[in-house]
Amino acid sequence: MRLVRFAPADGGAPRFALVQGDAAAATAVECSDPFAGDGAPPAPLPGGGTHALASLQLLPPSEPTKIVCASGTYKAVIVSMNKAWPTEPVIFLKPSTAATGHGSAIQWPTHAGELTHEPELAVVISRRAKDVPPDEIDAHILGYTCANDVTAWDVLQRVTHFTRPKAYDTFCPVGPVIVKGEGFDPDDAGIRSFVNGLPALDTRTSDMVFTVREIVSFCSSVMTLLPGDVISTGACGVGQVAAGDLVEIEIDGIGRLANTVVRG
């Protein structure tokens, strides 16, 4: 399954579509809302429209009540920083207003002096999850997508906690599609980022201390996960960006999430 959420040209409510084909020839067939039932998979709508994927204004693939982010999840980062090996995931929250879609702008706050990006694999929750063990969590996962954990780096150095520097509007681009199945393995996927087309960061999810399912299960033990919530599973490092930069997050089997940094 490859699923997108888009803004229709007539200005109506956001719609969902299943992506067929690939690259420039891909089409999107309108489908049922995957969050309307109790995790029922989306199905093509009778008489629903078919669109060229490239023509659609893509939105964040869900409307999360919260974005849960994991930190310090990659082995290489722990080793390079000489940190103690974690025994459980470290998590923090971004507000729902941080979410923005593929092709939209990352707004640079006027009082932030330095911005960074972090390429991450994100999980989209399909139905309510509370205290779900790792071997049962798949039933609560709609699929996987790209995320960019944007940070006001100089603010982080001043306040030393994550909420303010990571919570600004548009500081969590998500998309462009949700993928589940089709041979995609969340525990061994290549992740990389590009700034103005130049390689920035590169890793694989196989370097994570905890599996993706373990991270999502742990989050469900702390708080109730609701349909549409996003779990971003951490990054291999940070990369600087400047105003005007095009930042792209690429994950094998999913695609590229692209956003331009714009002064707010």
Image (cartoon, rainbow, N blue to C red):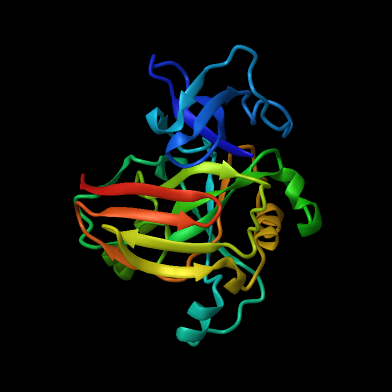
- What is the residue that sits farthest to the bottom in this orientation? 82
Quadrant occupied by the N terminus? top right
Give how far across and how far down residue 79 sits, in percent. Answer: 51, 85
User: Measured along the vertical axis of the image, is residue 68 above or below residue 215?
Assistant: above
User: Measured along the vertical axis of the image, is residue 178 above or below residue 39?
Assistant: below
Quadrant occupied by the C terminus? top left
Residue 236 shows in the view: yes
Give how far across and how far down residue 182 sits, in percent. Answer: 66, 47
Horizontal side of residue 100 vs 225, given as left or right: left
Horizontal side of residue 112 vs 98, given as left or right: left
Q: Residue at x 39, y 61 (%)?
A: 193
Q: Nearer the viewer, residue 247 or 213?
A: 247
User: Residue 134 sits in which quadrant?
Assistant: bottom right
Q: Nearer the viewer, residue 168 or 121?
A: 121
User: Measured along the vertical axis of the image, is residue 245 above or below residue 53?
Assistant: below
Q: Residue at x 41, y 55 (%)?
A: 249
Q: Residue at x 68, y 26 (%)?
A: 43
Give how far across and how far down residue 173 sits, in percent. Answer: 41, 47
Q: Nearer the viewer, residue 68 or 149?
A: 149
Q: Residue at x 49, y 35 (%)?
A: 26
Horizontal side of residue 27 vs 31, given as left or right: left
- What is the residue that sits farthest to the top in this orientation? 47
Give how far across and how far down residue 123 sits, in percent. Answer: 59, 50
Horizontal side of residue 241 vs 202, given as left or right: left
